[in-house]
């Protein structure tokens, strides 16, 4: 598991119900993500979970891959697909609001 540094910003969000069930079905795709699979697998949805930039990078990649996979979700109107897609949109928005503005605020180097 990666340890966050003092400048790493966590995104705290609560994932529960059907969204959590659907996400936990796909934790095996996260096996190379420094313990993220275990973190999501053990998460109960009671309290907010802290996700760092590298966690969200992995989650968004996995969700994108799963949502585009016809074998996982052949019916795009399926409740599981819709819940996972809503979670993907939420996490993507949180990622953009938290991390992309920080990239734009980096100081320019003087020549």
Image: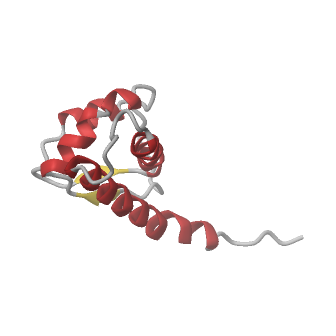
Q: Does residue 101 appear left or right of residue 10 in this picture? A: right
Q: In front: 108, or 84?
A: 84
Most distant residue in the right direction: 111
Residue 105 x, y percent position in the rendering? 61, 73
Most distant residue in the left direction: 46
Q: In front: 57, or 106?
A: 57
Q: In front: 70, or 27?
A: 70
Q: In front: 10, or 70?
A: 70
Say which quadrant the N terminus sits in.
top left
Residue 20 x, y percent position in the rendering? 20, 46
Q: In the figure, 101 relative to 55: above or below? A: below
Residue 10 x, y percent position in the rendering? 37, 56
Q: In the figure, 74 relative to 47: above or below? A: above
Residue found at x 48% / y 44%? 61
Label total for image: 0
Q: Does residue 40 appear left or right of residue 31 in this picture? A: left
Say which quadrant the C terminus sits in.
bottom right
Q: Quadrant of residue 66?
A: top left
């Amino acid at each position: 598991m990666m340890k966050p540094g003092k400048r790493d910003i966590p995104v705290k969000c609560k994932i529960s119900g059907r969204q959590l069930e659907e996400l936990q079905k796909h934790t095996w795709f996260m096996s190379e993500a420094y313990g993220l699979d275990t973190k999501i697998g053990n998460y109960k949805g009671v309290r907010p979970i802290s996700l760092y930039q590298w966690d969200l990078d992995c989650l968004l990649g996995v969700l994108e891959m799963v949502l585009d996979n016809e074998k996982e979700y052949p019916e795009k109107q399926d409740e599981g697909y819709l819940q996972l897609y809503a979670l993907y949109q939420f996490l993507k928005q949180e990622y953009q609001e938290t991390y992309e503005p920080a990239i734009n605020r980096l100081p320019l180097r003087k020549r």
